[in-house]
Image (spheres, rainbow, N blue to C red):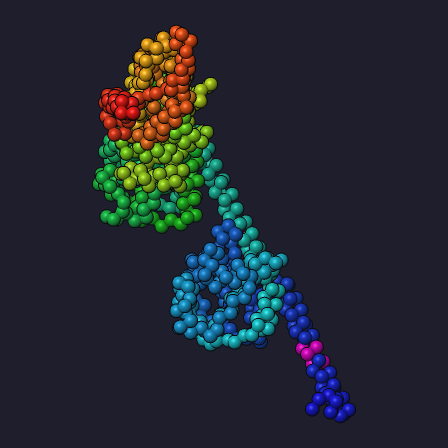
Amino acid sequence: MNDHDKTHEQLISELNELRKLVSSENKAKALEIEHITNFITTVNSTIDIDQVVERLMTVLNDVFTFNQISIYLYNSQSQMLEVSHWYGDGVTKTLTDNFINCPISIDWDEVFFVKAFLNNSPKYIAPITPELVARYSERDQIFYKWNPHKSILILPLEVQGKAIGVINFVHTQASFELNDTEIHHIQCYVNQVAATINHAHLIQKMKLTLEKTQRKEQEIAHINDIIQTANTTLDFNKVFQAILDGLKGIFEFDGIAVQLADEEEGLLKVFKISGDLISKSDFRRIKDTPIHLNDKKCVSARVYSTGEWAYFPKVTDSSPFYDIDREIHNVLPFSAYLGLPLVFQGNVIGVITFIRMESHYQLSDADFEKIKRYVASISVTMANARNLDQLKYTNKIFSSLLEASALMHKEPEISDVIQYTLKSLSSLFPLCGFGLVFQGERPNSVEFAAFQGFEEDEKQRLFEHVSLRSDWSSEEDLSQWMTQNSVLDTLNGSGCDSDVHWFLFPMSEAQSPMTGSLTVKGPFLNQQSKDTISLFLKQASNVIANKRLTMELEKQANTDGLTNTYNRLYFDSALERVQRMSKELPFNYFSLFVIDLNGLKHINDDFGHVSGDNFIKSAADVLLSVCRKSDFVCRYGGDEFIVVAPNTNYELAGNLLDRIREAEREAHVVCRDFNGREETVPISMSIGVASSEDTAPKNVLEVADARMYEDKNAFYQKRREG
């Protein structure tokens, strides 16, 4: 029946029914609004999260059945969702501890909680079956194992358009069924409590911060008392007593020992031991036990070199104690150990150790922080004692600098200056290795280099990865850079100690394009050590700058007047330098080009020696035009030239040979005979090339010369056949 067929009475009846339905829905809507308004009034009248959640559970139980609510709030510093509260049936301390000790990283985007938080949208799962759980992510399966349930609704907690966490409704016994309208209805209630939960959480954090501040003020007052005691005396007995008074409320210990670093001898020396159970004979035996600063197997040496504390609450046979530690343990059979670095003005100057002879330690993170603050309060006193020892060390440095300054100026070559610099540094820092590299004018070329205390494979890997870098502008600890660029992995693969620190000190000279770098490997260098090394480098740089000026004058004095190339005498010097460099760095190859001109006798006989000289000069111009700045083009004699190419393996030598041949094909000289007849004569060269890559450095010249004669014979053989 359509509307046309209906009677007037039927239409009126249907209209009345529709009006009743609309009126009923309006009343329900108004009741819901009133309900939400009352709920908002209730939650806004308190900042107690327990009351808010209790009211929320009461209201929402009219919508659906659940028996647990948990709240996760986002920690922006740790970027974790952390449990704030957990309510309901079956909620035990074990359950909450499991989740509290496992904050959820927002990087775990496969986890349901994280999905709801990041997407700012509900996550509803029901019914939950074993088959469904089997498809969960690994972490969600762990969470389900801790708290098995039949259904879950995860809703974002949103404040001013930004998610601050999630709230989770769970039923552990039965599955609840919800449609989209009901979920939206629940979300409306959750949105009303989000701000209150956030405010309550912030107020709770403020209370905790205030309590922590009050405790800190009390601790500071106590530390000030210790500082006053420590700064008014160098009597270590009084200092130790001040430490005992400060730490007795935190933990108990039976002995305290102070070790200070002696960098001159490379040892960590026992400065003081105190304790009721430690005898004078025990002290003497421990004091006579040498501990090297770079002994990575010794606990106290590791504390010194890393600047990190070592804590063994219960010493057992499996504790990482080795020879030196076992020797000390035989003297003092301690059952618990705590070692902390003594730091003064950012530098580690020693180690302070606390031991227990029979009982064990049970220290929290807060305890550690307090202990470290108390120990820091006496570091000034320790530093004063250390400064007394440093006076002798400083005198040695200045004596070495004066001696080095005098002797460096006497050294004839830059390589000798570099070697003496490394020798001086090694005497001051016997535990370190040094590598000094000076770059040439051509990128990735080396003019001078020397190493002490480096293995051959270390030289090569460090040379390849670090020494030729030109972007260092200040002294840097290379360890982090080398780790990021896998250089340490390469070095470690050859047996290098992964705990070794690497430093690079750039060197530069005024008015010179050549730069250098000193690489240091060894124990961590404090600022005083860095300053000492910088002083030696500055002194060496000044001497090298003067030597380079002398070398420039030597070049000018040894320049051939006809060809503007270097002469035979300078060639001998250049060859000696590259051979010496090859001995220091066998992997840094050099190449030689022996070149003899073809047809000079014909030109001299037919056109005269003036034309012959022009022929020689034109050939020299060809070589000078294509050779690199770092190459040495030398006139060996008559019409014979030798090119010394440092930092050049056989492949690079082949590239240079190609450039020479290409320029040779374009080169010629116009000659005029005695009758005025002109003839264009092409430049022709016989060339022999050899490299230290495949030839012993001392034999490179001989091999290149033999190959030149082979090339010359081939040239004339071809001419005769042609």
Identity of the residue drawn at 71% across and 84% down? 18
Identity of the residue drawn at 69% across and 82% down? 21
Quadrant of the frame with the N terminus? bottom right
The picture places residue 93, in percent across and down from the top left corner, at 43, 64
Q: Is residue 155 magenta?
A: no
Main secondary structure type of the part rendered in magenta:
helix
Residue 238 figure quarter: top left
Residue 515 figure quarter: top left
Residue 268 visible: no
The picture places residue 572, in percent across and down from the top left corner, at 30, 15
234 or 122: which is nearer to us? 122
182 or 254: which is nearer to us? 182
The picture places residue 425, in percent across and down from the top left corner, at 33, 23
Residue 105 visible: yes
464 or 236: which is nearer to us? 464
Q: How many marks?
A: 0
Q: Which segment did they paint magenta?
A: 23-28
